[in-house]
Image (cartoon, coloured by chain):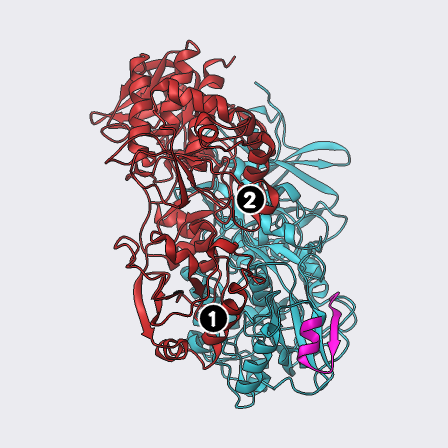
Chain colours: A red, B cyan
Amino acid sequence: MTSLHSSSRPCRLAEVARWDLEADVVIVGFGAAGASAAIEAREAGASVLLLEVASGSGGTSSMAGGDIYLGGNGGTPVQRANGFEDATEDLYRYMLMAGGPDADEERVRLYAENALAHYHWLEAQGVRYRKTYLPGKRQAPGTGDCLIWSGNEDAWPFNEAARPCPRGHLPEVVGEMGGRFLVTTLASRAEALGVEVHTDARVVALVADDARRVHGVVARIDGAERFARARRGVILCAGGFALDREMLMRCAPQVARLAADALSAGHDDGSGIRMGLSVGAAAIHMDELFTTLPIYPPESHVKGILVNEQGQRFVNEDAYPGRIAVHCLRQVGDRIFLLVDHAIFEQPTELSRIEVAAVGESWEEVERELGMPEGTLVHSVRIHNQHAAKGLDPLFHKGAKWLKPLDEPPFAALACHLGHAFYPYFTLGGLHVRPTGEVLTPDREVVPGLYAAGRTCCGLPRSAEFYSSGMSLADCTFFGRLAGRSAALAR
Amino acid sequence: MTSLHSSSRPCRLAEVARWDLEADVVIVGFGAAGASAAIEAREAGASVLLLEVASGSGGTSSMAGGDIYLGGNGGTPVQRANGFEDATEDLYRYMLMAGGPDADEERVRLYAENALAHYHWLEAQGVRYRKTYLPGKRQAPGTGDCLIWSGNEDAWPFNEAARPCPRGHLPEVVGEMGGRFLVTTLASRAEALGVEVHTDARVVALVADDARRVHGVVARIDGAERFARARRGVILCAGGFALDREMLMRCAPQVARLAADALSAGHDDGSGIRMGLSVGAAAIHMDELFTTLPIYPPESHVKGILVNEQGQRFVNEDAYPGRIAVHCLRQVGDRIFLLVDHAIFEQPTELSRIEVAAVGESWEEVERELGMPEGTLVHSVRIHNQHAAKGLDPLFHKGAKWLKPLDEPPFAALACHLGHAFYPYFTLGGLHVRPTGEVLTPDREVVPGLYAAGRTCCGLPRSAEFYSSGMSLADCTFFGRLAGRSAALAR
């Protein structure tokens, strides 16, 4: 019988000869979730040891735009300063829908009721928010402005479920990624509170007793294995599995239709999830791969229409680009086209790898150039134009303000093909946890001594189709905090 | 620390006071996989204990039509008797595609090369095959005839990957389900070989040592817990999780769009999969829910066209109905219509719950009656008719023999709506195993002493979109045998 431990095989407690390191709470990963957990655990009086595989804090959170999904409770100061009242029930209903068909009601409720307090907590940690609002369709613009429409709030069918309100809150930072600023701020705060941080420390296995209570971790530090004892709990905040090709193919093989644009700071290798599984935890929604097709900027392209290689429309183009990308993946064939006319055309960003596939003085000409059967693409444009002229989209319910007949030549089809255009992705599936971060078995028993937060668990966002920007960081920070507090107060 | 065991928590070997039962190989479940495993294990000289939760053999296999996907090696006797040569490479290429984007090449190769031998093995067990062939589009017809086209062999894009050949082999039985006959035959054979069978025996947990080697199971028999020792291995053949609503919602929430038509003999509660997880196994493709929309019989309806609630076509209607159902689930909206004209209309089967939604003397009238925007459905029919008249389907590549203009009034739209029509389902995801049935951890280490077969594991079929009828029973019987042999010869 081998005694070798790995991410899939815990080190038996009986085999730990000595503890090299020791703390009340041991946190694996120093991204937004780990930093938030560390702050709360310290503030609850626990000693905290934080192990990070990279050479500094950040994790994949640092590659995000940095907007956090906040609101409710009458509105955050930023929402109110810009004339938006935001009822808790609207935030709740929206996030429940955004969580997908298996949204965790308890988690969403807790978040909705505490999102305003979470805003104030973020400010108290040093995350600055300017009281400004940017209308329209935006990705994180990098101007230091705050409030944006970051999801499907004003798009069908979400706008029928909850009163639309902008809720993406970007931190006040210019010239760097908001996510980087967010994590750095939280990480500095954690260090100031006396969290013991080891970087270049790769956690290779959990330590568990024969009843599967988790007692600590084994980490590789300075070329040697060190045993770190967690008196109260281990919190896994080690990210998702966007870089583990095999795990992706086994759980989310749709990734094979995308170019290799994993959104990751380099360590989303699934080891956090595997460590949870190794002590009997359940993993859920492992097929949910978030991906997005940034058809804007330019914002004017939202007025274009998307068609599949049969020349048919398939989604309201004013939906959040993540929702659009999921619908692209549902089409027969990998060729996806964004149709635009002279009035709305602007050069797509280089990043998007969206390229002109065909141009023509008529839609008939574009259709021919794309090799589509006569009358197919032309029909889609005709039906669209006819209703758009009246401000209507009876097929996909696109909002009136984005409806415009595509009738000003020249016309163009822009290629947004799967496998070629930029569809960055990360994973939403992970360990099944309570809102407290306590990790659950398939029978919903708690795994004693183990917690998870961020993309190592399956949290607020659990459906790529319904996701909104800012949900994952909301989940990382808010439920990271809860996990930190729960672990610190365990026993 | 509780010592209570469950499907998610193995009983510790140290806590087993005595073994009530003992055998070389313990098999959980007496469906096609369990029976096949039992036969081989006995023939390899092992003593075999088989525990079945129901009062007799059968499992969900007994609810199947009973066709097994067989061919290659120049053709089975039935294929050859009907003029079909079937090259091993064609069977291999077809099944590789049918396995989906993460098909297990090693498993498919092994199956393709041994499918003819497997046919002879089935006959040797007493499964009779008549040397007859039924052309056309069929579900298991119950006539005792054998060879049918059971999948996508002749449909795009499969017909571009491998030379089409019919490969569904139905056993010679009239007036009962072929699957019932198949399992009964295999089960009788197992009993004749001296397998010790306990029915009404619910396996509640594995028994494992602290290094996670599996040593047996705990079963509830006659109201008491019994400990059954497996000297060489436990084989989990306990079915899938189509009846565990919570597991479904956590892994395959698309089930929420279907009516409650789980295809199950009553015990697909996921416990087999959870027991594997409880000793560190990996589960893969847990989102893959097989479902099907039986648009035929009547076969003539294959000549109809399917449209979504936007009035658009979305799939080649000559595809296997399972593939059609997956594409139905990808549409925006739950309303799906099968459009037929007077020439092809026949009353759908009662079982299908496909009902007439609208009729008209023109397609314009049908479109109006369905409340679709003017020109949408009519356009789809027009494009279809125009190309069908020439034997072409440039959009979805439906085969020429199923193409016919829908131009003979009256016309009808038949409702095949999600949530209403009959979309029976079962699960394809399960434990990750080698072709030998050895169960693997997420790091692809073998869990010593544990094997799985049938829908407790993820086998040949691992994609609802690409599935063919007969693949699951092929997997259950062939890889059930391999698991039985592997366990019998272990150590």
Left or right: B182 in relation to B470 = right
The residue depicted at 60 percent of the width and 32 percent of the height is: A89
How many marks on residues? 2
Residue A201, by quadrant, is top left
Mark 2: few/some/many CA within 10 Å (<14, 14-19, 20+) = some
Image spot of residue B113 (x, y percent): 45, 69
Front residue of A38 and B13: A38
- Mark 2 — on which chain does it sit? A
The quadrant in which the N terminus of chain A is found is top left
- What's the magenta region? B352-368
Q: Is residue B362 magenta?
A: yes
Which residue is the site of mark 1? Answer: A381
Q: Dot 1 lies on which element?
A: helix
Identify the amino acid type marked 2.
Gly
The residue depicted at 63 percent of the width and 28 percent of the height is: B18
Which residue is the site of mark 2? Answer: A100
Image spot of residue A342 (x, y percent): 34, 66
When the figure is inspected, residue A414 is found, relative to residue A98, above or below; the finding is below
Image spot of residue A384 (x, y percent): 51, 67
The residue depicted at 69 percent of the width and 68 percent of the height is: B370
Q: Furthest residue to the bottom?
A: B390
Left or right: B222 in relation to B276 = right
When the figure is inspected, residue B356 is found, relative to residue B234, above or below; the finding is below
Identify the amino acid type marked 1.
Val
When the figure is inspected, residue A462 is found, relative to residue B115, above or below; the finding is above
